Image (cartoon, helix red, strand yellow):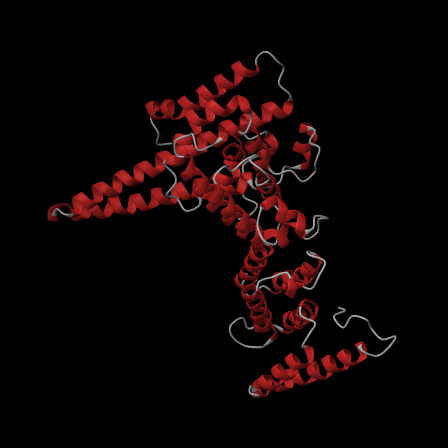
Amino acid sequence: GLNRHWSFANLFSSVPAAKDEEEEEEESIKKDVDYFALNTARRTSRSKKTVLERFQNKLALNVIGVLQKAEKRLKETERKEESSVGLSLLDDASQDGEEDTYDSANDSETTEELLETLFFNISSKVEKSVATRLQLKRADVYYYELVASYFGLDEHVDTVEKILLPHCVNLWSVELFPAVFALLMHRWVLKHDGQNKKGWLIRLNVLLKGSNQLFWFDTQHRTHRLLSLFCYIRNKLDGNAGIENEKKRADFAHMLCRFYYYYRSSKLERVNEFLSVAHVSLDTFVLETTAHLCAVGENDTLRIHYLQCLTRLNETRGADLEHSLERTTINKLHSTLNAFILPGAPFHPSMPVRNKARETMAVLFPHGQWSRSAINGLFTLLRPNYWLHELGHMLQYFIDTLYSFIPFGRSNPTRN
């Protein structure tokens, strides 16, 4: 399903209308789109539009058309559901009620399919042929970046408020729409929306929910499609540039803390710089990262990645981590790492994950390694099923630990 899209190489050919629509309904659907196109043409008539601007305009028009059709399908579904409930109360109309219920289910699927197709289209990468024609500076540009930057322009603020937002309000209840809204409107919401506008808090909550869904989608599929969205939200947390409400800014900061190591682990930015921009404490960062590590599921690649990133926490304050965190945070981190070291419940970690957890524990908490190894070994003896798996590893671990204390031996027992 990740590759389903329209013919983007043909500059987003117009979305075909449903065969059963009447002319009056078609005109009502195109009314707002025509107004948007006319308004945009008037604003840009004085200057010659580039190929990129024309392409973005056509993208925006087709997106608005899809949202209008999705809204129309949703309204038809609601009307048929109401009529089916009324007919079901009449004994002599039970058959009609069943038919209407079946039709409404099909319409509901059509609404979700429209939004799902739109989601996979705008979250796909711009083809090389299209990127060459548009003369894009980056090679890894996604369609949602083009649409979001177009809606975020100053000259489109009024048009977006009059045309696009009313359709969005009617689609809040659709499960996938928050993610679509976050892709399309994140620049407009964080740049032009504010506390002086009606419904700003709802839109901010939808953006927060949709961004969280998108980052989880990226994490589960091991892609970095939403890196641009992550960086844009991060930049808007700095100062008063974007989110005015302190509570909501904290909510966005906590969300970015959970996915920070997934998107920023390969960058040069240190955790200290991120904490100063997001205005969060190191304790909050560690707690959110630990919670995300526990929530990634049985994904060994992600678990090992996050455990490896956690070893960098000692670099944040230039001192031992135990002197930089509160006792409750240390206990939470210690218990989580210990849960990944031991086999079985609650996480059932694989052997590579347990090895990486041991290495992370040795780096973050160097004191008490011998006592921890002895305690873990005693608990392993209580589980006979793991004896054969653990015996070889325990011997190798003790040899490596002893060898690390020998002069001219390995200075770091956590070497991969």
Q: Residue at x 17, y 44 (%)?
A: 87
The image position of residue 303, as x and y in percent, is 61, 63
Q: Residue at x 71, y 48 (%)?
A: 267
Residue 408 is left or right of residue 187, and the answer is right
The image position of residue 75, as x and y in percent, is 31, 36
Q: In terms of depth relative to the viewer, which is nearer, 132 or 56?
A: 56
The reply to whether residue 14 is visible in this rendering is no
Q: Residue at x 26, y 46 (%)?
A: 101
Q: Is residue 280 above or below residue 383?
A: above
Q: Is residue 221 above or below residue 407?
A: above
The image position of residue 369, as x and y in percent, is 68, 77
Residue 390 is left or right of residue 62, and the answer is right
Q: In terms of depth relative to the viewer, which is nearer, 33 or 355?
A: 355
How many numbered marks, from 0 up?
0
Q: In terms of depth relative to the viewer, which is nearer, 103 or 153?
A: 153
Looking at the rendering, in which quadrant would you find the C terminus? bottom right
Q: Is residue 289 above or below residue 21?
A: below
Locate residue 332: give its quadrant: bottom right
The reply to whether residue 198 is visible in this rendering is yes
Q: Residue at x 64, y 74 (%)?
A: 351
The image position of residue 226, as x and y in percent, is 59, 44
Residue 38 is left or right of residue 129, and the answer is left
Q: In terms of depth relative to the viewer, which is nearer, 334 or 62?
A: 334
**Residue that protrudes farthest toward the top in the picture:** 46
Residue 25 is left or right of residue 244, and the answer is left
Locate residue 379: give its quadrant: bottom right
